[in-house]
Image (cartoon, rainbow, N blue to C red):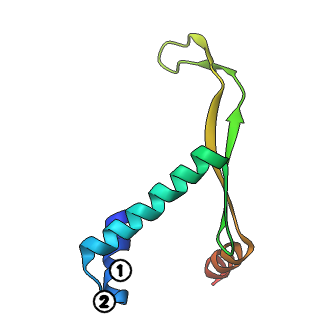
Amino acid sequence: MTKTEIGHKIAAEMGIKQIDAKRIVQMTLDGIIDCLLSEGRLELRRFGIFDVRVRKPRKARNPRTGVECMVPERKVVCFKAGRIMKGRVAAIAQS
C-alpha cells in the first residue's frame, strides 16, 4: 500500500477531500520524522515503537571488486511492533 492509497482510503471513510486526506497523512509522517530527530524515540500505544540507534563502524567488502573498506558509524531507525499489532498479524498468518 502506498501513501496515496492510504490517503484515498481515509478520504473515502471520512467523507473528506482526497487532497485533505493526503495532507493529513503527510503531516503525520513529517511529525514522526520530526519527533525522531528531536527526541530519538516515538512510542505509539497499541502500534509500536520507533527508535533511533547508532550502528557501529564495521568492515565491509565491495561485492564487485572484493576490496575491503570501512563503513563509518551511522544512525538508523528501528521499529518494534506493539503487542496488539503482533497478535493481529500472527492471527492472519495462522489462518
- Residue at 53 percent of width and 18 percent of height: 62
Q: Residues within 10 Å of mark 1 (few under 14, many from 20)?
A: some
**In which quadrant is the C terminus drawn?**
bottom right
Residue 81 in sight from this viewpoint: yes
16 relative to 82 in the view: left or right? left
Could you say where residue 65 lies in the image, as x and y percent from the top left?
49, 12
Q: For residue 15, which quarter of the picture?
A: bottom left
Residue 2 in sight from this viewpoint: no
- Dot 1 or dot 2, earlier in sequence: 1
Query: Tag 2: residue type?
Result: Gly
Q: Vertical placement of 61 versus 93: above or below?
A: above
- Residue at 54 percent of width and 57 percent of height: 32
Q: Vertical placement of 39 versus 91: above or below?
A: above
Q: Which element type, helix, strand or loop, lies under badge 1?
A: helix
- Residue at 59 percent of width and 18 percent of height: 61
- Residue at 66 percent of width and 47 percent of height: 40
Q: Vertical placement of 58 versus 13: above or below?
A: above
**Does the residue at mark 1 contact the one at mark 2 (Cβ under 8 Å)?**
no
Residue placed under numbered mark 2 in the picture:
15
Rendered image: mark on residue 9: 1
